[in-house]
Image (cartoon, grey):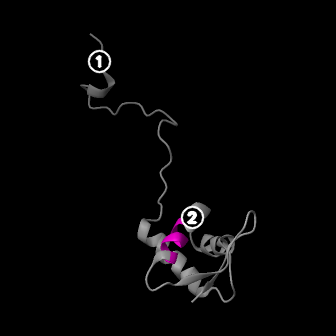
Amino acid sequence: MENDLRTSNNNEEPPIRDGSRPVVTITTTYGQINRLVKEAVARMTKPFTIRGLHEDVYNDVNISLDSVTTAMIRIREEQPPVVRVKVPGKGRRATIFEEI
């Protein structure tokens, strides 16, 4: 009868296969991203686009442009509003925001 590696009788660890698991990275949570984006909006002195905001947030924490966009949508819908649309985007032109 063959020994199963999962139930070894001699208390040895089963062999570890290299590359069998993905690398786990620590990510920011739902509330942290919103807070980081709000802080970045407060630091902006001029009207800004989402890409400009992403560059500012990306210097602090490695988050994606999609995450910043989603956070901006939530922030725009908050009461009282923190930002407003100064110039709406059209086609390839980006929306320009400003702090209230």
Whether residue 74 sits left or right of residue 100 in the image: it is left
Residue 54 lies in magenta, yes or no? no
Judge by depth and name the residue closer to the eye, 37 or 95. Answer: 95
The label shown at residue 3 is 1
Task: Specify the quadrant that holds the N terminus.
Answer: top left
Compute the Cα span from label 1 to label 2.
46 Å
Residue 58, how many percent across, how many down?
62, 70
Q: Label 2 amino acid? A: Ile
Task: Specify the quadrant that holds the C terminus.
Answer: bottom right
Whether residue 8 sits left or right of residue 79 in the image: it is left
Judge by depth and name the residue closer to the eye, 72 or 5. Answer: 72
- Residues packed near mark 2 inside 10 Å, few (<14), some (14 to 19) or many (20 plus): some
Numbered range of the magenta stretch: 70-76
Whether residue 31 sits left or right of residue 55 in the image: it is left
Q: Is residue 78 above or below residue 93?
A: below
Q: Label 1 amino acid? A: Asn
Residue 67, how many percent across, how many down?
54, 63
Residue 74 lies in magenta, yes or no? yes
Q: Which residue is mark 2?
A: 63
Judge by depth and name the residue closer to the eye, 79 or 35. Answer: 79
Q: Secondary structure at mark 1?
A: loop
First in sequence: mark 1 or mark 2?
A: 1
The residue sitting at 43% across, 66% down in the picture is 30
